[in-house]
Amino acid sequence: MVKEAVMPTQLSTVLDVLVPIFLAGEIAAAAFIDARERRFPHALSVLLAATSAIFGLMHGGIRGFAWHALAAAAVMALLLATETLWRRMHGGAAGLGGGDVKFLAALMLADPLYALASFILGLCLLAVCGLLARRDALPLLPFVAIGCALVPLAALLP
């Protein structure tokens, strides 16, 4: 008896379940590491980008993924230019870290609007917590991870 090959629809169903779980785990790991060490490891950024790319390809096809990649590159270039200008105007003091920009660019490969909304919500949460705690610097990715969890809930609002 010849074994049946996995049908594309079966593979698609498995990926539809596993890829978001991996994305959530990678986002949580990034938040945890940033909270403890104030960094976003390169290996994790590559893994997040790869998983995000798989998600983007699954849900948008090649054409949709190409737009996601273009949006990620444009936003990354804009943020890097803004950060360069910021550092020149503030004596070399960092605004956004390079890891924060890498995280956003990687997540944008999955869904640019979701990534931007989560990032903006994370920045707002960071600002509020920074004011309440009277701290000049806090790690951003834990707040972005909260944004990643809250943004999908907005779809439930009437």
Image (spheres, rainbow, N blue to C red):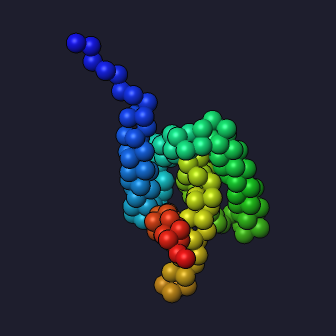
Q: In the rendering, at what x and y percent does residue 127 appear?
A: 57, 78
Residue 55 relative to residue 77: left or right: left
Residue 29 relative to residue 50: left or right: left
Between 85 and 19, the residue placed more toward the observer is 19
In this rendering, the answer to whether 130 lies above or below 32 is below
Q: Residue drawn 31% across and 21% down? A: 4
Between 157 and 1, the residue placed more toward the observer is 1
Pick the quarter of the image with the C terminus. Answer: bottom right
Q: In the rendering, at what x and y percent does residue 20 appear?
A: 43, 50
Residue 71 is at least partly visible in this image: yes
Q: In the rendering, at what x and y percent does residue 68 appear?
A: 65, 46
Residue 43 is at least partly visible in this image: no
Q: Residue drawn 40% across and 58% down? A: 28
Quadrant position of residue 121: bottom right
Q: Residue furthest left?
A: 1
In this rendering, the answer to whether 113 lies above or below 154 is above
Pick the quarter of the image with the N terminus. Answer: top left
Q: How many numbered circles does the render carry?
A: 0
Q: Residue furthest front?
A: 1
Residue 118 relative to residue 24: left or right: right
Quadrant position of residue 78: bottom right
Q: Residue furthest top?
A: 1
Q: In the rendering, at what x and y percent does residue 51 appear?
A: 48, 43
